[in-house]
Image (tube, rainbow, N blue to C red):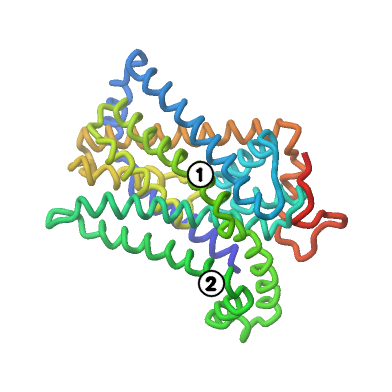
Amino acid sequence: MKLAINIFLSLAMLALCLWLVWPGAAERHELGAAFQRLELRTFAPYLAVYAGLQIIVHVCRSLRWNHLLAPLGVKVPAGPLLAISSVGFMMILALPARLGEFVRPGLLRRRGISASAALGTVAVERIIDGLLISLLVFGTFFTLRGPDAPGWMMPTAYTALGVFTAALVFIVFAMWRPEKTVRFCLTVSLLPRFAPRIASVIEAKVLDMIRGFAALKDGKQLALFLVWSLIYWTANGLGVWTLALAFDLPLSVVGGFAVMGLVGVGISLPNAPGLVGQFQWFTLLGLSLYLPGVMNEGSALHAQALAYAITQHLLQVSWYVGMGMLGMASPWVSWADLRASRQKLAPDEPPGEQSANAPAAG
């Protein structure tokens, strides 16, 4: 039922976002003109800088995971970790409702850690990322507040910050009193009353996942993770700004980071397959805060901004699919591993699997 609801929400998001960004006949003409105005001679240098920043983003986003795994006694060499992460990022993009988030933990099952505990590290990663971009969105939006600011701006900032702060509070209490915290949350959900067997399975899995929160107790590893994350998000924001300049959009550096943050918050919702429409609409929404008139359909500025959003989405999709396929072609990830990762939250671990504190395989 949960899977069906997630897929329905994902497809509904796809339909909504496509409806929001789909250009009419006049807009398609303007959109075509916006692409035709691009000249390879001037566009190529921006594209080269964007590609370089994307390499930094990908490497930092992949390798920083080791600092969350280290407190669990697991260290994955750079090559396998890049391959596993690349495949996982590709599946996050390919599968609806963020079901791809389970792939990376599933691919680590043979490297000395249970899928549930690895999923706990992914949860920490997502919550820290969410807090970082929420703080970024809140800070940039706060500087834009005023009588002329759109009504949705500050409620969005407060909501995003509140959601990820609540998730962080759960992590803190879960590390302090794991059994009581999980039982309290389950009791509030009323699941033990209507489905006690399912509730007991969920309780066991969540308690195992909480082991992945151990990174928050290791100050050194957490600090290193935050350094990698700051480099990752800085390169990402600079990439957003650089590509905007390639389309002659007068976006400031701060505006580039604000657009990146809003898109990050937007794709945290039930994601449309491939983020189609969703990525473009949130990009336009972010641009509208700094470039008035962007949301005026039929205008040249709207077409120019939409061309930018489409190009950035296409580059992102191409990059992650390409890196994911390279990961699949590597000796460290196979199609059998990918199929097995679907069993990531099976109640029992495979026979002979190492304990979470065993040395990592090479």
Q: Residue at x 68, y 65 (%)?
A: 208
Category of crowding for the residue at label 2, using alpha-carbon neighbours closer than 10 angstroms: few (below 14), some (14–19), many (at least 20): some
x and y percentages locating residue 316 in the rendered image:
47, 35
Toward the left, the furthest residue is 147
In the depicted structure, whether residue 74 falls above or below residue 5:
above
Which of these two is toward me, 293 or 151? Answer: 151
Label 2: state its secondary structure.
helix
How packed mark 1 is, by other alpha carbons closer than 10 Å (few <14, some 14-19, many 20 or more), is some
On the image, numbered disc 2 is attached to which residue?
173
Residue kind at label 2, given as amino acid type: Phe
Q: Is residue 242 left or right of residue 297?
A: right
Where residue 127 appears, as percent x and y from the top left, is: 49, 57
The answer to which quarter of the image holds residue 329 is top right
The residue that disc 1 covers is: 274
Which residue shows up at 38% across the image and 65% down it? 162
Q: Nearer the viewer, residue 51 or 61?
A: 61
Identify the residue at image location x=47%, y=31%. Answer: 54
Q: Is residue 318 left or right of residue 307?
A: right
- Which residue extends farthest top? 41
- Gap between marks 1 and 2, in whole Å? 35 Å
Numbered disc in front, either 1 or 2: 2
Tag of residue 105? none
For the residue marked with disc 1, what is the amino acid? Answer: Gly
Mark with earlier residue (1, 2): 2
The residue sitting at 69% across, 45% down in the picture is: 75
Q: Which corner quadrant holds the N terminus?
A: bottom right
| Figure quadrant of residue 189 | bottom right
Q: Quadrant of the rendered structure where residue 90 is?
A: top right
Numbered disc 1: secondary structure: helix
User: The C terminus is located in which quarter?
Assistant: top right
